[in-house]
């Protein structure tokens, strides 16, 4: 009723002086507190304040400034600046510029009003001040003429006003307005003031990076501006780990300039409006980096809350205020976990501070740090002054940049609730990228794609694809009410996908073509080699025969020569034996002689060794002795004797003695000659005479080396030599006979040896001859063997070639065709990948008809741009791998086209998939497909889902997150965006506060059961949305399988086995062909030389042929089975049509949610329960009819009365449309009331035929079946008037031939034109005609039946309508089921959620029933309820446990619970009579008659029930009944009945005043 809780609380204080303490219930008196309230005028989201509150205030109005006041204020400001800084000639421009600004501001206030689509179109004086503030930024050096200043004013006006406009029309209007103001106020032509297009009018202070001070000047060189910004981007990426791969085009650079302008302004804040992925955050970071500002942004985690938010705000304010750093606080609407975040932002924008943000300790720290700074600035040093100094300092250094999406449902409400977001921010709207931007980005992204001459065409094509998807998304929303956002990020995604898929397909096609070409080359080479081998064999055979004969002849000659050689060899052996004996005898004699000589030889060797060491000087010294010592003399004499030197006779005659000293001295004087003679002395022929003379010396005891050594070294050597010669002589005498014997034996041996040599020479000649013959023989044999080997090799190769060609020759033609097709595919690859990449990036959220429309549009663009592509190119044709698709289908992927496309998109998309999966098909398929990889399953409602994800990321496991709501948890962002980075050489990912090693095998799948989720653009760009809603084709196949499995289980089992078998065989065939081609391509040299390879290829082909034969046989068998199965297809078709009819009911009411498992369970049960037929045709009719009614019964139980006929009619039409008996144009006319065209003719009878009816008839007449119906009406007005006036028009025949000519549906179209009030009974009759009367007579609600359909894990939901309360019916049923003492009732509301959880936890174990009433009042607790119900496991819950829920229709009620529950609608009876009957239903005659005051009780009870029925029935008259739809329930009536019984028992007389007051004023009034 317009009451606002905060206002009412304040009003209580003003009227009562305080409030009650909610804990102690004591009244708290507030003293010495006064209030000053501030408010804006109502409107624009501001509500009116009640007079009951305003009466406590003295109101003072602050009217808006008039133009004169604004002119005075801003004129003084601008003139003061101009006098101080600008040239004198510009002073005259100040007043006109201010006038122009005020005029523009006034026009915008009048013309650009806020609307639901443009809630930010609000303007205030801050905007006007911002324009003037921009003029104060004029650079005196470059602003020298009025045109310069005017251009700056135009620019600032554009930045403040134009940048927030969202449509091209609005911007064009603004441009025209500004163009008109310049000549009007400034007296100069527009062309003189602004010489560039308005879109290219840019000012900035970033054109000279690093130069201080930065000057705010006009940027006339657009290309240079782009280059400067690109350089800044490179600098940013060089110093930041998180790179921004941006492409700088004109539009993006303009946004950078706009953000830079805001950041350079004092206390400048920006509100960037645009869908997620439009570059708002990236460009803000770049602009901040260009200004050398730090960017701070909160990081959302699972545990992020208000405490963390406050800490982040503290950190930001302390950096800006205490440290004095320039900071940009970047905040997006996806980070708004609580609306209180925006409340704090609103305070920061307004006052630069957040109330109660800093505690006492924080404040003391701030005051302490600010004291020296404030003292230096001459500020007061009080605590309040210091804190204010801190706040002002923070405001000076802090810039808030808010990024919001205008597509958000909460956007308009947030702007209303927090007006500072608009009032204190400069708004920049990021519109769709222009064509120039699309081309620029695409051209840059596709540089590495090597597109050649098609580069420009592909760039244009992808831009047009993006625009076509934008248009399709608008149509998708208009026609289907489904949201799909196409953002710049989507465009970047399609470019990346195009590059990836093009590289993948090029490699794939190239590899396949190369293998096939090599295979063909090998086959062709083999064919040529077969002829060569045949010729070689023919040529080698005669040579082989001739060589064999020559070998035989040589073999005979070798035998003869070998015999001769053997005889000679025998003689040689005999002679060798004799010679050997003689040689042995000689050796014995020699050994004996040498043995004897060995005794003397050591002494001789020793003497020779001493002589060798003797020096000539030593000998010469001996010769110098005049009187030699005895030893010397003795040795000299011995030497002379041995050498035969005669002595000198001395002494008297007769007494002469031999003196050897003189001749010895002479001998010693020739030392060299002496030594040579000693070395060469003939020791073997010493005369006996000399030996005899020497003997006395030898016998002399002094003639030993030891004694002589003391006298002379030289004499010692000679002594040893003499002794050695003497000893050797005597030994030689003993050896001499042996020597002679040896000599004789040796001579005899020599003779024998000569004879032996002759014999050996003869033998050698014979052997050489034999060796020559053998060599010739061996050569001939080798030649023979070589020829034989060549012949054998050629024969083997011929055999291998025959096997190879026999096995693979049949593939030659097919391979040639495949190579040709691959060459064509390679030529068409760019165009085909354009379509495929576009489908992967864009088509996921769309339904089949939209996908087909888009692909057709894309192919048309390819034709227009001349890009080669395959005919009928689509994502399935380009990217589908038949073997892989068949494998998917075995794991549960439906076989329809849309599901196959979804599988291909899921496999090739770069982003993780988010499957819109209301029927659970995608979830089931993914779980089955990833089962071998140990897939983990979690839900956002799980407490430990983050831990599950962390483990999967670490160990590389797949994860399925199911039941994803329409808002993605912020904790998922790093996973969705794949934010990985390198740490210590490993790839890691930060999830929340934990750094996890990232495994490359990790996979993430998200599924949601929401049939039509609305994901914000920011969420949409992070995932690959895939619409897995079941299609008619896919559902039909599934239901056919269920039908045949029940009716012919043997047939279905065979079919399933064949499907698996065929898939395996197809995979084997593919693997075998791949193996054959790989082996052929990898083989080197002559393939015929590799026996193992030939065997492998032959065996592979044999296996392939066997599998092909089996596959053909299986295909034939499968075709026969399919033919039999198709007999049951009409049942599946009917059921599929009805399913979509049921699914469409969710559009009527959000509570009408039904799951695929529920539907299939009902379908299966209907097959089992339906009566058998005598033949297949009768059985099919029985199955269809039984299921149709069974579905009607179950659905009607959960539908409101107003929708039951609607369902029956829609089901009927769906069945007829499925059989082709409904024309689409006629059906469209019936539901919309118009056709494409209309015949322009005047109304022939406006008195009874209304203009609306005639317009409908003339529209209907344009349809073929109704051609001429308007003329029939015109020509037969009386007949048609009778038809019009009939009280049962829907049952009356149509005039003239039309009754026979038109069918039932067509008659409804006529009825819609002429008597629309009879359309509902006409629809009812239509249903009766086609389906029977039972389809318009819904069965009565039966709690017992609904209870039987429920389980301990399947809740029972009562869908309420105003005035209905099922509590009494449930209590009665509980009593009947003997559960009345085990029923817990909880009415949900504030704080009841935890209580309900407690009771549910107990009931699960104890087998108690729990009734949760009014779930719609606990919307915030519904996700918790959903999480609890999802975790139910039948085996872990008591079998008697039941969860009963009641709720009004609400979009907040969990869809998953609705889909997996038994639903019943509870409505109050319609009409006074039915209300009365319902009220009396709980009473029996016995109860009424047994009352003590029967007469009064009976009358009062009737009056009370009639009063209740009257109040209920008044509501159907809308505002005429009650201006507000009051919810009078049976609970009100029950309460009154209890009070009636109590007061009648208490009073003797009926207390009418009391009852009237209780019933009329308290309970109902």
Image: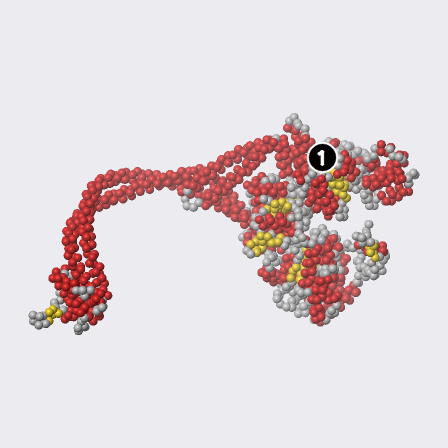
Q: Name the residue at 60% across, 43% down.
A: 926
Quarter of the image where one finds residue 1532? top right
Q: Nearer the viewer, residue 25 or 377?
A: 25
Image location of residue 936, percent across then percent down: 61, 45
Left or right: 394 as drawn, with respect to 1560: left
Left or right: 564 as drawn, with respect to 308: left
The residue tagged 1 is 1348
Q: Secondary structure at mark 1?
A: helix
Judged from this view, the residue extending furthest toward the front is 701
- Residue 1204 visible here: no
- Residue 1177 visible here: yes
Work out which quarter of the rendered image holds the C terminus and state it: top right
Judged from this view, the residue extending furthest toward the right is 1549
Quarter of the image where one finds residue 53? bottom right
Left or right: 1227 as drawn, with respect to 1555: left
Image location of residue 1342, percent across then percent down: 75, 34
Judged from this view, the residue extending furthest toward the top is 1174
Judged from this view, the residue extending furthest toward the left is 654
- Scheme of colours in the image: secondary structure
Q: Name the residue at 89% across, 35% down.
A: 1493
Image location of residue 271, percent across then percent down: 70, 58
Q: Name the residue at 68% across, 35% down.
A: 1162
Height in image: 1115 above or below 504? above
Q: Nearer the viewer, residue 961 or 215?
A: 961
Image location of residue 468, percent across then percent down: 64, 49
Q: Quick one: label 1, few (<14), some, or many (20+) residues within 10 Å?
A: few
Quarter of the image where one finds residue 305? bottom right
């Amino acid at each position: 009723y317009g009451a606002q809780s905060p206002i009412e609380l304040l009003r209580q204080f003003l009227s009562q002086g305080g409030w009650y303490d909610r804990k102690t219930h004591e009244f708290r008196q507030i003293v010495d507190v006064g209030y000053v309230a501030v408010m804006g005028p109502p409107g624009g989201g501001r509500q009116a304040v009640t007079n009951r509150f305003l009466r406590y205030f003295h109101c003072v109005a602050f009217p808006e400034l008039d133009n004169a006041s604004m002119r005075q204020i801003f004129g003084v400001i601008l003139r003061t600046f101009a006098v101080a800084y600008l040239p004198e000639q510009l002073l005259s421009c100040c007043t006109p510029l201010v006038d122009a600004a005020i005029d523009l501001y006034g026009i915008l206030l009048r013309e650009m009003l806020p609307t639901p689509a443009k809630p930010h179109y609000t303007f205030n004086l801050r905007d006007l001040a911002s324009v003037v503030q921009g003029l104060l930024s004029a650079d005196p050096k470059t602003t020298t003429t009025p045109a310069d200043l005017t251009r700056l004013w135009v620019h600032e006006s554009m930045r403040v006003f134009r940048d927030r406009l969202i449509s091209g029309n609005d911007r064009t209007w603004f441009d025209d307005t500004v163009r008109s103001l310049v000549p009007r106020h400034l007296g100069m032509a527009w062309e003189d003031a602004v010489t560039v297009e308005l879109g290219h009018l840019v000012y900035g202070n970033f054109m000279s990076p690093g130069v201080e001070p930065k000057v705010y000047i006009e940027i006339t060189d657009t290309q240079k501006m782009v280059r400067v910004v690109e350089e800044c981007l490179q600098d940013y990426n060089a110093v930041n780990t998180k790179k921004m791969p941006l492409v700088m085009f004109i539009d993006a650079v303009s946004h950078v300039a706009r953000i830079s302008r805001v950041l350079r302004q004092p206390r400048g804040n920006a509100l960037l409006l645009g869908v997620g992925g439009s570059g708002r955050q990236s460009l803000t970071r770049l602009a901040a980096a260009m200004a050398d500002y730090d960017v701070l942004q909160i990081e959302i985690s699972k545990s992020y809350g208000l405490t963390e938010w406050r800490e982040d705000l503290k950190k930001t304010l302390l950096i800006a205020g205490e440290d004095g750093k320039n900071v940009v606080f970047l905040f997006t609407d996806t980070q708004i976990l609580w609306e209180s975040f925006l409340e704090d932002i609103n305070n920061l924008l307004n006052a630069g501070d957040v109330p109660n943000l800093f505690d006492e300790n924080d404040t003391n720290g701030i005051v302490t740090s600010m004291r020296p700074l404030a003292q230096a600035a001459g500020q007061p040093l009080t605590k309040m002054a210091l804190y204010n100094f801190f706040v002002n300092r923070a405001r000076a250094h802090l810039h808030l940049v808010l990024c919001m999406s205008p597509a958000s449902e909460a956007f308009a409400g947030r702007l209303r609730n927090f007006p500072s977001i608009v009032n204190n921010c400069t708004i920049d709207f990021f519109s769709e990228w222009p064509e120039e931007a699309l081309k620029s980005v695409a051209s840059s992204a596709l540089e590495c794609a090597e597109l050649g001459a098609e580069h420009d065409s592909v760039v244009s094509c992808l831009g047009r694809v993006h625009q076509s998807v934008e248009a399709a998304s608008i149509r998708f929303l208009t026609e289907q009410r489904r949201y799909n956002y196409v953002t710049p990020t989507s465009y970047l995604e399609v470019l990346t996908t195009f590059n990836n898929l093009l590289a993948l397909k090029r490699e794939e096609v190239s590899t396949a073509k190369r293998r096939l070409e090599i295979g063909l080359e090998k086959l062709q080479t083999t064919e040529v080699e077969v002829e060569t081998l045949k010729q070689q064999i023919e040529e080698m055979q005669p040579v082989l025969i001739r060589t064999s004969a020559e070998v035989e002849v040589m073999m005979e000659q070798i035998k003869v020569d070998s015999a001769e050689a053997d005889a000679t060899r025998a003689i040689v052996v005999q002679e060798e034996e004799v010679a050997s004996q003689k040689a042995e005898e000689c050796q014995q004699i020699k050994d004996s002689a040498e043995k004897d000589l060995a005794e003397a030889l050591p002494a001789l060797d020793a003497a020779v060794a001493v002589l060798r060491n003797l020096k000539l000087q030593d000998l010469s010294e001996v010769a110098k002795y005049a009187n030699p010592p005895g030893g010397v003399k003795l040795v000299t004499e011995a030497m002379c004797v041995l050498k035969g030197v005669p002595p000198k006779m001395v002494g008297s005659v007769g007494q002469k003695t031999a003196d050897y000293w003189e001749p010895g001295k002479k001998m010693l004087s020739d030392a060299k000659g002496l030594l040579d003679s000693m070395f060469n002395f003939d020791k073997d022929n010493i005369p006996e005479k000399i030996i005899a003379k020497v003997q006395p010396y030898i016998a002399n005891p002094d003639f030993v080396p030891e004694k002589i050594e003391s006298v002379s070294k030289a004499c010692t050597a000679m002594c040893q030599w003499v002794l050695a010669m003497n000893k050797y002589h005597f030994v030689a005498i003993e050896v001499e006979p042996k020597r002679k014997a040896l000599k004789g034996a040796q001579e005899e041996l020599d003779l024998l040896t000569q004879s032996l040599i002759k014999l050996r020479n003869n033998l050698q000649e014979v052997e050489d001859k034999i060796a020559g013959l053998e060599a010739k023989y061996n050569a001939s044999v080798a030649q023979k063997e070589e020829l034989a080997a060549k012949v054998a090799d050629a024969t083997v190769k011929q055999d291998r070639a025959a096997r190879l060609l026999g096995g693979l020759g049949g593939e030659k033609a097919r391979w040639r065709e495949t190579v040709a097709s691959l060459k064509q595919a390679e030529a068409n690859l760019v165009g085909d990948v354009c379509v495929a990449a576009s489908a992967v990036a864009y088509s996921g959220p769309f339904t089949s008809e939209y996908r087909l429309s888009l692909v057709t549009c894309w192919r048309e663009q390819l034709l227009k741009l001349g890009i080669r592509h395959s005919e009928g190119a689509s994502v399935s044709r380009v990217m589908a791998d038949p073997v892989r698709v068949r494998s998917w289908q075995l794991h549960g992927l439906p076989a329809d086209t849309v599901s196959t496309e979804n599988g291909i998109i899921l496999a090739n998309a770069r982003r993780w998939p988010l499957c819109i999966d209301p029927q659970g098909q995608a979830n089931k398929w993914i779980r089955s497909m990833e089962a071998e990889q140990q897939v983990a399953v979690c839900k956002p409602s799980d407490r430990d889902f983050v831990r599950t994800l962390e483990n999967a990321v670490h160990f590389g496991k797949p994860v399925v997150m199911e039941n994803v709501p329409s808002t993605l948890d912020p904790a998922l962002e790093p996973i969705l965006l794949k934010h990985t980075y390198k740490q210590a050489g490993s790839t890691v990912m930060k999830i929340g506060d934990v750094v996890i090693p990232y495994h490359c095998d990790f996979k993430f799948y998200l599924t949601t059961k929401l049939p039509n989720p609305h994901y914000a653009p920011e969420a949409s760009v992070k995932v690959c949305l895939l619409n897995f809603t079941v299609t008619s084709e896919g559902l039909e196949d599934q239901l056919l399988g269920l039908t045949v499995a029940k009716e012919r289980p043997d047939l279905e089992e065979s079919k399933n086995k064949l499907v698996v078998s065929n898939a395996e065989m197809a995979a084997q065939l593919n693997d075998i062909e791949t193996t054959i081609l790989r082996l052929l391509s990898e083989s080197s040299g002559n393939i015929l030389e590799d026996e193992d390879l030939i065997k492998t290829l032959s065996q592979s082909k044999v296996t392939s042929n066997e599998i092909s034969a089996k596959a053909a046989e299986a295909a034939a068998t499968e075709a026969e089975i399919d033919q039999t199965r198709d007999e049951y297809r009409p049942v599946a078709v009917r059921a599929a049509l009805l399913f979509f009819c049921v699914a469409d009911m969710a559009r009527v009411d959000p509570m009408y949610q039904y799951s695929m498992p529920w539907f299939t369970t009902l379908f299966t049960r209907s097959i089992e329960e339906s009566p058998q037929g005598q033949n297949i045709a009768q059985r099919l009719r029985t199955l269809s009819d039984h299921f149709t009614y069974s579905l009607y019964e179950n659905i009607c139980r959960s539908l409101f009365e107003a929708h039951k006929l609607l369902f029956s009619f829609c089901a009927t039409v769906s069945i007829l449309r499925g059989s082709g008996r409904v024309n689409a144009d006629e059906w469209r006319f019936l539901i919309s009331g118009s056709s494409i065209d209309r015949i322009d003719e005047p109304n022939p009878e406006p008195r009874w035929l209304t203009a609306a009816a005639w317009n409908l008839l003339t529209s209907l007449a344009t349809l073929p079946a109704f051609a001429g119906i308007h003329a029939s009406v015109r020509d037969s007005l009386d007949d048609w008037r009778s038809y019009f006036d009939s009280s049962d028009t829907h049952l009356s025949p149509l005039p003239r031939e039309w009754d026979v000519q038109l069918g039932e549906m067509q008659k409804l179209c006529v009825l819609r034109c002429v008597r629309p009030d009879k359309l509902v009974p006409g629809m009812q009759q239509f249903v009766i005609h086609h389906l029977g009367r039972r389809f318009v007579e819904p069965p009565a609600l039966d709690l017992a039946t609904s209870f039987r359909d429920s389980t301990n894990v399947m809740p029972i939901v009562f869908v309420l309508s105003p005035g209905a309360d099922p509590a009494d019916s449930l209590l009665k049923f509980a009593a009947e089921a003997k559960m009345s003492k085990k029923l817990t009732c909880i009415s949900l509301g504030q704080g009841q959620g935890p209580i309900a959880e407690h009771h549910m936890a107990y009931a699960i174990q104890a087998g108690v029933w729990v009734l949760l009433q009014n779930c719609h009042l606990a919307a915030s607790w519904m996700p918790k309820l959903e999480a609890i119900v999802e975790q139910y496991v039948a085996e872990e819950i008591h079998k008697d446990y039941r969860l009963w829920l009641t709720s009004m229709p609400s979009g907040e009620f969990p869809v998953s619970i609705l889909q997996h529950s038994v639903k019943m609608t509870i409505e109050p009876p319609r009409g006074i009579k039915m209300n009365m009957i319902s009220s009396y239903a709980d009473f029996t005659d016995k109860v009424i008659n047994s009352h003590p005051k029967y007469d009064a009780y009976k009358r009062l009870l009737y009056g009370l029930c009639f009063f209740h029925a009257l109040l209920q029935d008044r509501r159907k008259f809308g505002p005429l009944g009650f201006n507000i739809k009051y919810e009078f329930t049976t609970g009100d009536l029950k309460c009154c009945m209890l009070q009636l019984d109590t007061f009648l028992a208490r009073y003797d007389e009926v207390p009418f005043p009391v009852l009237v007051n209780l019933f009329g004023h308290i309970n109902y009034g």
